[in-house]
Amino acid sequence: MADLLISGAGIAGSATAIALAQAGHRVRLLERAPTDTAPSSGIFVYSNGLLTLDALGVLPEILAAGYAVRDGRNLYLDPQGRTLAETRYPALDGGRIPAIVGIRRADLHRILVARRAALGVPLRLASEIVALTETPGGVRVTLTDGTEHAADALIVAEGLRSGTRALAGWDVAPRYTGFGVWRSVHPRPAEIDAKILVMGAGKRFGIMPISDDRLYTFGTISMPKDRRIDPAQGAAEMAATFADIGGPARQFLDALAPEAEPFYTAVEEVALPLPWSRGRVLLIGDAAHASTPFMGQGGAMAMEDGTVLARTLAAVPDDLPAAFARFAALRYPACAFVQEASRRVGEAGAIETREAVAARDAALARDGQAQVDGFYARLAAFRAETDAALAASAVPVP
Ligand SMILES: Cc1cc2nc3c(=O)[nH]c(=O)nc-3n(C[C@H](O)[C@H](O)[C@H](O)COP(=O)(O)OP(=O)(O)OC[C@H]3O[C@@H](n4cnc5c(N)ncnc54)[C@H](O)[C@@H]3O)c2cc1C
């Protein structure tokens, strides 16, 4: 079993720490932030991500804290609230794994932290790697506080602005996508029990339950690269941006105030070709493959990195550089597929002319369900291909 250092205790780092500790490896986590917390806004976890959370041993806690949308219902509305289309996301394993769960990011993090702790994974906060060297049998890092730490390998899970990625020799910068996303959190009226997307011209506004009593909203808009948003003006900016959006979204837009935690994110992506590993240093999660958020899959891909890595280390033991290269070759096609699909959805949301909007909405009504089914069938095929590849390279049991 290996002695592994993971830098970054977000979704990828936490999930990977759990998967590796469950497999019997010694794992230590480093985190730059001074506290082990996450924001309160929401995140969707679709069935494939829930499958990973099941493998990490936390699915019951996720289902208890979050909100599983019955039958995976997803409503597309026009800006006046009229239905354009209705689609259903697929559940897995005969319905045991729901189609889609909304959850507070803080709750997802809390649940991963508790599992990490139960497995005895130590976390060192306020710690950033400032020097990194590869030794014949491992890696050695120096942290901001001057302490040195050795391990068999380093897994970099520092998100899209990873500093250690550059230290390890990758020359990659996040690419601004031309989109911004506004988010806010509100009490959930009982009648909002599905995922809702209001499709405007050049913008989209989504609503998703994240617990029995809360929901979050997310509004996407094209935005110039260096647009600065004054956080003190967040509620007013968000309300003005989506002033032409009505239907069920209106009540939340009218209720925007600092308590709703209006929050703006400029959307960036990291489309890094292989290799994702250099010797005994491996990039995972957003540090390797940050996606635009339009498929709601970045977190799921980050968590699945953890379970696939643990299985790859079992199939290719005693050679960490070879196992890391194999892992990246297994994960690259699925992550690139999600990025590409997400880019296309982002572009459809940016359509502005009346004719193009009408054509997009007609296509949604006509092909929406087939698109959903095709996307999830492809993700299932990637999982099957990974299973087959790992089974083929598995070390035979003597
Ligand atoms: C607007 C928006 C909406 C999204 N919605 C969804 C969704 O609904 N569903 C979904 O699955 N995904 C969603 N995503 C994507 C998802 O949030 C990311 O893919 C996911 O957070 C990636 O996890 P990560 O651990 O790789 O990176 P992060 O979550 O960024 O975590 C990185 C961690 O590393 C730490 N760190 C950074 N630098 C260092 C350093 N030098 N040393 C030590 N620690 C460091 C950070 O403090 C942080 O804790 C969304 C993204 C955006 C922008």
Image (cartoon, rainbow, N blue to C red):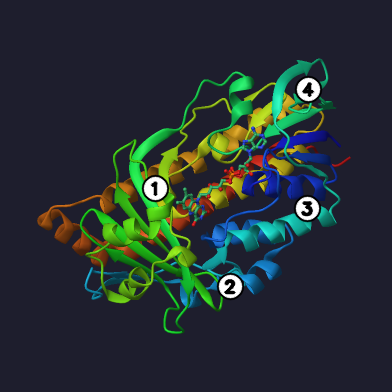
Locate residue 191: give its quadrant. bottom left
Nearer the camera: disc 2 or disc 4 = 4
- Residue type pointed to by label 2: Gly
Q: Which residue is mark 3?
A: 116
Q: Alpha carbon of mark 3 to alpha carbon of mark 1: how far? A: 36 Å
Q: Residue at x 69, y 26 (%)?
A: 281
Instruction: State if disc 4 and disc 1 touch (CB < 8 Å).
Output: no
Residue hosting label 2: 94
Q: Picture coordinates of residue 30 (x, y %)?
A: 74, 38
Residue 265 got which mark? none
**Residue labelled with disc 4:** 139
Q: What's the residue type where badge 4 is placed?
A: Val
Kindly identify the residue that appears in the image at 17 percent across and 58 percent down.
357
Mark identifier at residue 230: 1
Circle 4: is it few (<14), some (14-19), or many (20+) Cα within 10 Å? many
On screen, residue 388 versus residue 6, left or right, reads left
**CA separation in Å, label 1 and label 4:** 42 Å
Q: Is residue 383 above or below residue 208?
A: above
